[in-house]
Amino acid sequence: MPRLLSALLAAPLMLTLAACDDRPCCTAPSAAGAMAPPIPAGRQSKVDFEALTGIRSDAVAAITGTPNGSYVYYDPFAAPPAAVEAAPAHLCAQHGKALKESYITEPEDHMPGMKVLVITCQ
């Protein structure tokens, strides 16, 4: 019984310590690896995501931005790599623009399992 009591008392402490890790969370990202804003909590319909990006709508969590620059928040495990690669040009073409640049980063809130495709159109 005393072992069980000790284990029950130690469990909250172990959970607190488990949250600490050695990830470099406070280092400044490089210009090409800058963090994207946190995942938006908008009410945008997911029906249009595939039409805008070419990525399956079940793999896209959110899209935010303007015709000149957008952030596509997606699940890298559910999104086919070829679709992610083609998405920047596809999204810019939907706005009648050409692709200027794009890169992949992480959301500022470090949402597990999410990546962000940062797209700039000209």
Image (cartoon, rainbow, N blue to C red):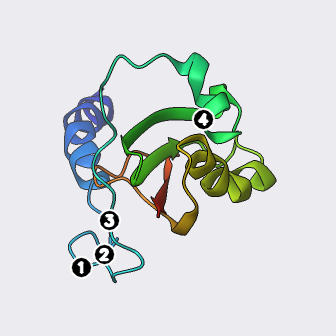
29 to the left or right of 95:
left
Q: Secondary structure at mark 4?
A: helix
Q: Quadrant of residue 35?
A: bottom left
Q: Using the image, determine if residue 81 lies above or below residue 61.
A: below
Residue 66 image point, x, y percent: 35, 45
Number of marks present in the image shown: 4
> In whole angstroms, how far apart are the C-alphas of marks 2 and 3?
9 Å
The amino acid type found where label 1 is placed reads Thr
Q: Quadrant of residue 17?
A: bottom left
> In whole angstroms, how far apart are the C-alphas of marks 3 and 4?
38 Å
Residue 70 image point, x, y percent: 42, 50
Please report whichever mark, 1 or 4, sits nearer to the chain's N-terminal start: 1
> In whole angstroms, how far apart are the C-alphas of marks 1 and 4?
33 Å
Q: Secondary structure at mark 1?
A: loop
Q: Using the image, determine if residue 3 lies above or below residue 31.
A: above
Residue 65 image point, x, y percent: 35, 44
> Residue 52, which numbered label?
4
Name the residue tied to disc 3. Answer: 21
> Residue 24, which numbered label?
2
In-front residue for pair 20/71 = 71
Name the quarter where the N terminus is drawn: top left
> In whole angstroms, how far apart are the C-alphas of marks 2 and 1?
6 Å
> In whole angstroms, how far apart are the C-alphas of marks 2 and 4?
34 Å
24 to the left or right of 83:
left
In-front residue for pair 50/79 = 50
